[in-house]
């Protein structure tokens, strides 16, 4: 057998034959899910197909509009709950959190799994070594009806990250920098393998951040190393050690390209409107006045993100002309933030805490900006209309940069808060 990349190995195992980049195959699917923006169509398709029993594990997450902001959304939520009861599937209802946090937290995803989600940021689970990718609702329904789906094996890009992160610089800055270099189409329908000392030293929250944003440069899926940090993280969520597979690329595996980035001199980065690959250093945008700051999302709504923001906000106040909105990525994150005193820091600073979920990020509720307003956000996208108003302007940044900007009232480099 030829040396294989991680994606070639995983898809080969699920097709029960040896595959290499460019091959087509029908593969068994381990886990699937939909959220309240996509599940309504999934339910309709399952009904149309006359499916009596689902052929693969499935769950639904109510996160994009939670709690419901309208009658129409409430009808969708009821439709999901009714479907879940009928087919006896797991459902994460309002308050549980964002799909890309609560599903990994649940222990349902394992290294080496093949996961399909009706959400474009399903690539997030590559942080724990799964081949996970977003698909349309109809494709998801086909996987539920048959237990399988077809795949074209992606070629793989290898990215090596070395150097030492400066204080006040985070995983979000790394991935924004890389996307700025490779551009939004730089990894279209490719898999991405990350390695190098910076990744090895990075915590799981940072790895989730990077994996989450791989779709913003077109990637089909991405992979972080499955190491002791991964294993420990999974064990804390009830996964038995014997279920955790070794997932690694073979020595001599063929890569389409290899990139090496030394981030020792990396500074806090910003993605400017209206494209994620429109990247600049935060310090170059100090004249950009902001109206709203948002901390949360499936990219940066985790405990390490909140700790970074809290360090900046501790004993300081949000600028009176700025609205700082904070959404924990899950109930577990919310409870941990309460236990650590982070929520108290946020509230004392003048922030508003909303229910765990996606609302502000996708523009369904909880913080839609007005015409001409400028938002700095820890989210993964800044397209026109992303936060609910195409006449607003969205800048993307790390939690520390968002917190510093909320205090100053304009885009700010946060490194001064980490000098001591």
Image (tube, grey):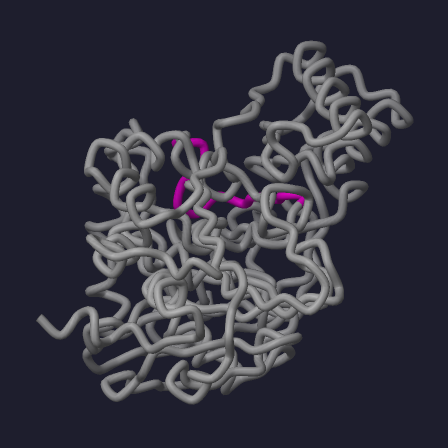
Front residue of 385 and 27: 385
Percent x, y of residue 363: 67, 50
Q: Residue drawn 56% across and 35% down?
A: 31
Q: Residue drawn 35% across and 59% down?
A: 207
Front residue of 393 and 25: 393
**226 magenta-colored:** no
Residue 43 visible, this angle: yes
Percent x, y of residue 269: 41, 78
The relative height of residue 321 versus residue 324 in the rendered view (above or below) is: below
* Quadrant of the rendering where the C terminus is positioned: bottom left
Front residue of 136 and 250: 136
Q: Kindly indicate the quadrant of the structure image that contains residue 261.
A: bottom left
Percent x, y of residue 357: 53, 38
Q: Residue drawn 35% across and 61% down?
A: 403
Percent x, y of residue 103: 47, 35
Q: Is residue 380 left or right of residue 231?
A: right
Q: Identify the magenta region.
A: 107-118
Q: Residue drawn 40% across and 55% down?
A: 208
Q: Residue furthest right?
A: 48
**115 magenta-colored:** yes
Q: Kindly indicate the quadrant of the structure image that contains residue 54.
A: top right
Q: Kindly indicate the quadrant of the structure image that contains residue 343.
A: top left
Residue 145 visible, this angle: no
Q: Is residue 172 left or right of residue 342?
A: right
């Amino acid at each position: 057998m030829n040396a294989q990349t991680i994606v070639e190995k995983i898809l080969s195992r699920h097709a029960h034959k040896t595959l290499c980049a460019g091959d087509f195959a029908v593969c068994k699917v381990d886990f699937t899910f939909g959220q309240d923006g996509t599940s309504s169509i999934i339910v309709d398709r399952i009904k149309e197909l006359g499916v009596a029993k689902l052929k693969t594990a499935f769950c639904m997450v109510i996160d994009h509009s939670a709690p419901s902001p309208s009658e129409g959304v409430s009808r969708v939520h009821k439709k999901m709950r009714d479907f879940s009861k009928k087919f006896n599937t797991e459902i994460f209802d309002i308050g549980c959190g964002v799909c890309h946090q609560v599903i990994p937290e649940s222990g349902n995803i394992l290294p080496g799994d093949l996961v399909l989600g009706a959400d474009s940021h399903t690539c997030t689970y590559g942080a724990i070594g799964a081949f996970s990718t977003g698909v349309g609702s109809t494709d998801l329904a086909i996987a539920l009806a048959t237990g399988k789906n077809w795949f074209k094996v992606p070629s793989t890009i290898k990215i090596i990250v070395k150097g030492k992160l400066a204080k006040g610089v985070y995983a979000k800055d790394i991935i924004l920098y890389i996307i700025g270099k490779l551009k939004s189409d730089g990894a279209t329908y490719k898999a991405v393998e990350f390695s190098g000392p910076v990744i090895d030293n990075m915590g799981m929250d940072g790895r989730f951040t990077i994996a989450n944003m791989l779709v913003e440069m077109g990637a089909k899926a991405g992979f972080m190393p499955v190491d002791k940090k991964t294993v420990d993280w999974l064990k804390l969520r009830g996964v038995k050690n014997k279920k955790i597979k070794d997932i690694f690329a073979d020595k001599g595996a063929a890569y389409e390209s290899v990139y090496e980035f030394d981030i020792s001199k990396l500074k806090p980065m910003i993605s400017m409107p209206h494209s994620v690959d429109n990247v600049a250093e935060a310090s170059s945008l100090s004249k950009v006045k902001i109206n709203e700051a948002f901390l949360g999302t499936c990219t940066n709504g985790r405990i390490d993100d909140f700790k970074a923001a809290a360090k900046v906000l501790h004993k300081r106040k949000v600028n009176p002309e700025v609205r700082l909105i904070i959404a924990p990525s899950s109930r577990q994150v919310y409870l941990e933030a309460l236990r650590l005193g982070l929520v108290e820091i946020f509230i004392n600073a003048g922030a508003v805490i909303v229910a765990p979920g996606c609302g502000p990020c996708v523009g369904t509720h909880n913080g839609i900006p007005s015409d001409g307003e400028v938002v700095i956000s820890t989210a993964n996208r800044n397209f026109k209309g992303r936060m609910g108003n195409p006449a607003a302007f969205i800048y993307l940044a790390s939690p520390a940069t968002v917190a510093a900007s909320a205090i100053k009232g304009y885009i700010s480099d946060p490194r001064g808060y980490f000098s001591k």
